[in-house]
Every structure is written in C-alpha cells, then in structure tokens.
Image (tube, rainbow, N blue to C red):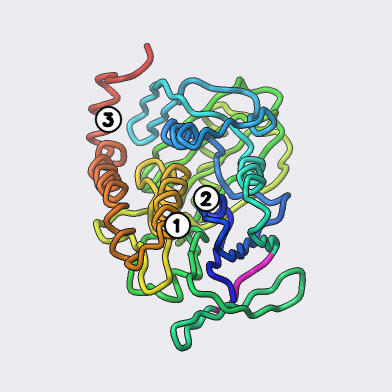
Amino acid sequence: MYDIAIIGLGPAGATLARLLDKKYKVIAIDKKNEKMGKCCGGLLSPDAQKILAQFDICLPKEVLVDPQIFSVKTIDLDNSIVRHYQRFYLNMNRAKFDNFLVSLIPSNVEICSDSTCSKIEMENGIYSFTFKSKGVERTEKVRLIIGADGASSMVRKTFYKEKKIDRYVSIQEWYKDKTNPPHYSCIFDKEITDSYCWTISKDGYLIIGGAFPKRDSKKRFEILKEKVKNSGVSFGELVKQESCLVSINRGLFSTCSGKNGVYLIGEAAGMISPSSLEGISYSMESAKILADIINSGCNSIENKYRFMTLGIRIRLILKILKMPFMYNKYIRKLIMKCGIGAVR
C-alpha cells in the first residue's frame, strides 16, 4: 500500500516528489526515460527562474545551452511587421532540465521511469493503479493519486472528463545550423494557427515549431516551414521531429484541481499560460502548494488546494484577457506599429 502515487515526472511531478514529507510511502511513474525530452522550445521564463530562486535551487551549467539570447524577434506575417522585444529567458536543454529536477528527489521515493500507467480504479475508498514498467505489468494500491502527466493526462481523462480544455498539437523539428545568426523568433500567422510559432537557435541547431489546432496540424506545420524558408532562413540537415499535445486554457473554468483523493498539478490541471504556453512556473508552484497541504496533514485537501491556487487562476484569467492583444491581428498591428516596448 502506497500513500501517494505521482503520475508524471516533469517539473510538476518532480517538484512534488522532492517536497513531500519522508514519512509518506511514495511511488512516481513516468513514461519518459533519461534520453527523452518534451517537445518544448526549452526557454526558462523569469517566473520559472523566480520559483527556482524561492527553492534555493541553482542550475548546473550543463543544463544551459548556447546561445543565451536577450530579445525575441516578433514576426507578424498577417500585417508584415517585424519588431524586437527584450526578454530574459534562459536557453536550456529541456531533457537535462527535467532530469536535473528528478535527480533532486530523495531516495525514499520509488521512481519508475520508462513506465506507462494504463488504468486507475477506486474500490472502498482505495485506489488501484496498473502500469507497465520495463515490460512487466504491476498493479498497486494507493490512498492519493496525483496527476502530473501534462496535456494528455490520463488521470484527468479518467476522473474529470467533464472538465473540457482545448488541446493543440505542438510540432517542432531540429536542423543542423551553421549559417543562420543566433536568434529566437515568435511568429504570428492566422493561416497557420491562432496560437503562435517559433524558431530558436540551440547548441548548433535550429528549432522550428509551433502549436497548431489538431485538424490539419501537419499540413499547417509544412506551410510554416515554407514561409520561414521564404523569409530567408536556411535549413540544414534534419535531425529529428518531436510532437506532443499542449493545453490552451481559454476559459474561466478550464482549470481542475481535483477532489476525493485525486488531484491535478501543472498542465494536467490546466495551469499553463494561454498566451505564451509557458507552464513550468505554474507546474512547480502548484506542486509546492499541494505538497505543503499534504505535509500539514490537512483532512480537507480539496478545499484548501483550490483556495491556495486561487492566485494561479487569477493570473491565468489575466493572461486570457491579454490574448486579444497578441492574437487579434488588428490590435496587434496597432501595438506593433506604435513600437510600444520594442527595442529600437
């Protein structure tokens, strides 16, 4: 019998596993192995940096990659406008970042990597979960289930189907890059997506990607590549393609914190910026809040967790209100034409 089962070991699950009191018997299940990374641009936002500072965590240099870029080139293809805006992201290797967070988990937590959870059921107030680890199927019992398994969360699908949230397909490709100057660009084009696309220089590679509606996502990605090529960016040898689902929280009731012994943190809970798709800061913050509540021995986890994450939900609402300024092409044209906040 386990006290807590954590499904997913991204920034949310790894942070929770690290902060839970050692008196609990904890198992953490993650489908990734040490070599796998998430389909992600790999830029650490100031909000995420602040959370790490609050934890007194310093990143080892091997997590960071060249180059460190201090501005984003914003390309508005709808209005044919280009502006540069100062930004303070850290360029990093996402897989190494996730592995670093996992390395901080204490030894009392049983970690099952390269494992997939297939079924969770409740019987007489106790949950049983079935997962396959290294080809062997296991079924265990647990008191609390924590869904930290991202946009495609099977925990959310199993227990909170009624809590709908938009899911887009994130696709990106890595190319060997020896000719383009180092840069980070953010691309807006209604023909391609009503979200945004990006190109990022990273350790001698050029990453081109975007978040697309599920319908015709591959076709939209090919249109993006063609437009990027036409803008003068050269592609080297294709190294790999990555894809995953990404949540886009566009409603006031899209977040779901959980109840009755099944709780969600990070992107699984819908805690991800709808404007920038940044989710690492929300993942670590929600994990910290839930860990503190569980460690306190509180009997009403559901109510307290929902109350303590109110600040996160308010910030997400403000991000939703910000979206027209980014994604409405007429408002965006006005702002970019004026050059508000742009680097001259």
- What is the crowding at mark 1: few (fewer than 14 residues within 10 Å), some, or many (at least 20)? some
The residue that label 2 is drawn on is 19
Disc on res. 295 = 1
The disc labelled 2 sits on which kind of residue? Leu
5 or 10: nearer the viewer: 5
Looking at the picture, how far across and down is residue 216, in whole percent? 48, 59
For discs 1 and 2, the disc positioned in front in the rendered view: 1
* Residue type (three-letter) at the residue carrying disc 3: Lys
The spot of residue 177 in percent (x, y) is: 69, 29
Mark seen at residue 177: none
Label located before the other in sequence (2 or 3): 2
| Residue at figure coordinates x 50%, y 35% from the top left | 52
The chief SS type of the magenta part is strand
Mark 1 vs 2: CB contact within 8 A: yes
Q: Quadrant of the C terminus?
A: top left
| Magenta-drawn stretch contains 330 | no
Tell me whether the residue at label 3 lies in contact with that at label 1, contact meaning CB atoms closer than 8 angstroms: no
In the picture of the structure, the residue carrying the numbered disc 3 is 333
Q: Which residue is at a point 43% across and 69% down the rendered structure image?
A: 156
Q: Secondary structure at mark 3?
A: helix
Q: Upstream in the sequence, badge 1 or badge 2?
A: 2
Label 1 residue SS: helix
Asked if the magenta segment contains residue 116, the reply would be: yes
Labels in figure, total:
3
Q: Which of the 4 quarters of the picture holds residue 9? A: bottom right
